[in-house]
Image (cartoon, rainbow, N blue to C red):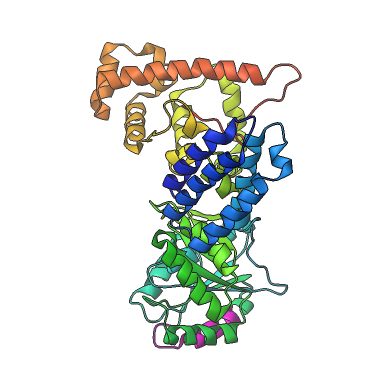
Amino acid sequence: MAFEGLAERLQETLTKIRGKGKVSEQDVKDMMREVRLALLEADVNFKVVKEFIATVREKSLGQEVMKSLTPGQQVIKVVNEELTTLMGGEQSKIAVANKPPTIVMMVGLQGAGKTTTTAKLANHLRKKHNRQPLLVAADIYRPAAIKQLETLGKQINMPVFSLGDQVSPVEIAKQAIEKAKEDHHDYVLIDTAGRLHVDEILMDELKQIKELANPDEILLVVDAMTGQDAVNVAESFNEQLDITGVVLTKLDGDTRGGAAISVKAVTNTPIKFAGMGEKIDQLEPFHPERMASRILGMGDVLTLIEKAQTNVDEEKARELEKKMRNNEFTFDDFLEQLDQVRGMGPLDELLNMMPGLNKAKGMKNLQVDDKQIGRVEAIVRSMTKQEKSEPSIMNGSRRRRIAKGSGTTIQDVNRLLKQFEDMKKMMKQMTGMTSGKGKKKGKGLGGFKLPF
């Protein structure tokens, strides 16, 4: 995950000060030195680090903090607030034109993931905002760029406007906007050309498209993996085009996270979206306060709940709760839950969103192995219908057959059966606790129950 090294360093530093009843000037000084090193190692811009440390030090030594009952926790609160401010303070939403269509120009260098991000944004606008975007293939230089956008358009069942690679991008943009008005599209997403580096020819063309299209939004797509270079690219594009927002891609990769922290401070342009994976639905609105919370190990419950609500069927959740209360939860229900959890994204990413889980005993370096989950699925799918609903009938020969059919061992089958029984007991206790008189019946995260 992005920020892993930074998160670990900051969390260790903050743990030392968290429980202190008294915080001295030296304590704050020592902590600031650690925080400064952690940020610089994460490739955060030097000037940004300098200003951040100065602000946090000043606020941490203020009367309000030093004389509070929990000064250690107050210092952490200051760090959290300033980190949030640094990344933009509040979520910056995508523009909506007073008179449709809203025109969005997607710009950036080659290799940043611009074409894929254009399709991801169209998918997001339709799914989350009920919009009808038109994708525009205006990159006529990169081989297969038009084909790539058309393929992605088919994948998400979204129209793509193209005039091939022999018509100028300015003309393509002009005709696309006319077409969008005719067909009542409320967004026009123009996928423009990129280069391997910022140059005059590229900028001139983008300025011409900007002049003709008069976009409501110019989104710069930058690769978070390139660290400080991503910030320099953002600065260059902003000087020439006055970009309105940034989309950071590959924020799920093994990146030091400096770009996400620096880009807003350096360009004074908000990060509007973050690409959290390669799949078409892995584009998330960027919430500075949630990202700061994740970095400091405080979890990100709101994003977790949103993911759960998107992937969970409310009616099925109520049905499932009833089954749990009556101890009727079967292996078929288990498989269904497994699919729903998988739909929310990689499991280790979900665990990272749970407050304090990364600090819990035995959880620090927890690696969730998707192959292991695959083996569990294989075992369950090798059971007969009766075995799934009545695991108590499992004798030795049935267990041997299931192990053979799933390519696992009898020990694996035995372990799963035991865990399943333990889980059913726990679920019964949990639903009993939340459905007592006068208590609200808990449906977990937005109706979501974790099945293991």
Q: Where's residue 139, x and y in %?
A: 43, 78
276 up-or-down from 204: above or below:
above
Magenta highlight on residue 171: yes
Residue 7 in view, yes or no:
yes
Residue 58 lies, in percent from the top left, at 65, 50
Q: Residue at x 45, y 42 (%)?
A: 9
Q: Position of residue 59 (x, y in %)?
A: 67, 48
The x, y position of residue 56, in whole percent, is 61, 50
Most prominent secondary structure in the magenta stretch?
Answer: helix
Left/right of residue 36 with respect to residue 315 in the rendered view: left
- Position of residue 441 relative to residue 134, above or below, is above
Q: Residue at x 51, y 30 (%)?
A: 450
Give the residue at x 50% y 43%.
10
Task: Using the image as rendered, state which of residue 176 and residue 22 is in the foreground.
Answer: 22
Point out the stretch of residues depicted in magenta: 164-179
Quadrant in the rendering for residue 238: bottom right
- Residue 434 is drawn in which quadrant? top right
Q: Is residue 287 visible?
A: no
Q: Is residue 322 left or right of residue 148?
A: right
In the rendered structure, the answer to whether residue 5 lies left or right of residue 128 reads left
264 and 210: which is toward the camera: 264
In depth, the one of 27 and 212 nearer the eye is 27
Residue with the most extreme right position: 438
